[in-house]
Amino acid sequence: MRGRWLWALVLTIALGALSAGTAHAQTGVKVLVLKGANDATNQAAVTTIKGLGQANGFTVDEAAGVADINPTKLAGYQSLVFVNVAGDAFDSAGEAALQGFVENGNGFLGIGSTATVEPMPRNPLPPSTKPCSAAAPAESNTSPATLTNTSAW
């Protein structure tokens, strides 16, 4: 499992560097790492990422907290890594900064529980959305089923 996210990190950094253009070729690739809880697991991940940076010629800085996810701070980086950042972590300005960072072609990698950051409402469909119906084939002798999307995505 550890090998997979290390490869994902290297790929994220490479893509961020390639999409950043020649302006970053002169200053070098910089990666900002934001960790969730201040525990041994997350600190070990940050230390490992910093070691990868030293071994591969890119700079890794650790964010002080979610307040660092803003356009001014992110402007100096080509890649962003979240390590176990979970839940409703950002205000609307932080969400907009993260979205703009990625939409501008920079790299992003979420590790661990980051998949649960900024959860969607339980049913993100507008109230006017009707459930879809799926009819079973006539030969199956079963009644039609009504499907309602209630998953968070």
Image (tube, rainbow, N blue to C red):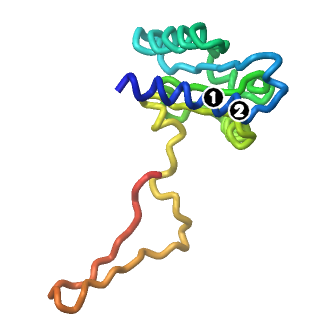
Position of 141 with respect to 98 (left or right) is: left
Q: Are marks 1 and 2 in contact (CB under 8 Å)?
A: yes
Identified by mark 2, the residue type is Leu
> In the rendered structure, which amino acid carries the disc numbered 1?
Ala
Q: Quadrant of the N terminus?
A: top left
The quadrant holding residue 94 is top right
* Label 2 crowd bin: few (<14), some (14–19), many (20+), radius 10 Å: some
Q: Which residue extends farthest bottom?
A: 138
Q: Is residue 9 left or right of residue 67?
A: left
Q: Horizontal and vertical percent for residue 98?
A: 67, 35
Q: Residue 73 appears at what percent x and percent y? A: 76, 22
Determine the image quadrant of residue 60: top right
Looking at the image, residue 45 lies above or below residue 111: above
Q: Secondary structure at mark 1?
A: helix
Residue named by callout 2? 18
Q: Which quadrant of the view contains residue 20?
A: top right
- Residue that badge 1 annotates: 14
| Rendered location of residue 28, percent (x, y) | 75, 17
